[in-house]
Image (cartoon, rainbow, N blue to C red):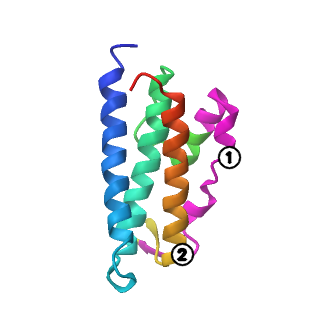
Amino acid sequence: KVMDTPTITQLLNEADEKLFWAEDEFNRPTEDVVAMCVCLNVKDVMSNYLRAYTFYNHITLLPQNTLNDLLKECINLDNEFQKIDLSIFMCKNEVIENNNRYCMTHKQTKECLEVARMTRDLVMNKILVV
């Protein structure tokens, strides 16, 4: 357990930093917000929080695992993760660049941030060592 702690802490710290950055970006005047940057950061945030929870449970998933893969693993560990809805991350009003999809609407970006905050709260409540 002690061996995993730096990795978990690193994942959580990086996720927190990116989430705070994304919230700052989102809170700028609407016309100045770079939605693609918020979207990309929030996807990383989600990945880090979910990955930290799997590490905490001694399950190491590969970096190429999708958010869906990570969430499925978290649900296998704890049913409470079923309340996380990843459909918002499918970016329905997307711009596709370098094979990645990005949200480009303010409303959708706001919903992504809300899901990320909920995920953070859930993971932090489950990981008591940090």
Q: Which residue is mark 2?
A: 107
Q: In the rendered structure, does residue 125 fall within the stretch colored magenta?
A: no
Horizontal and vertical percent for residue 2? 35, 13
On screen, residue 2 above or below 74: above
35 left or right, relative to 119: left
Horizontal and vertical percent for residue 116? 50, 53
Q: Report the amino acid beneath label 2.
A: Lys
Q: In the rendered structure, does residue 74 fall within the stretch colored magenta?
A: yes
Asked whether residue 98 is in view, the answer is: no
Q: Which residue is mark 1?
A: 83
Asked whether residue 130 is in view, the answer is: yes
Q: Report the amino acid beneath label 1.
A: Lys
24 left or right, relative to 83: left
- Report the residue at 54% width, 71% height from top: 108
- Report the residue at 64% width, 39% height from top: 81
Q: Circle 2: is it few (<14), some (14-19), or many (20+) Cα within 10 Å?
A: few
Which is more toward the observer, 128 or 4? 128
Horizontal and vertical percent for residue 52? 43, 33
Mark 1 and mark 2 lie on one chain; the one further toward the N terminus is: 1
- Name the quadrant of the N terminus: top left
- Name the quadrant of the C terminus: top left
> For the magenta stretch, what is the residue range?
72-96
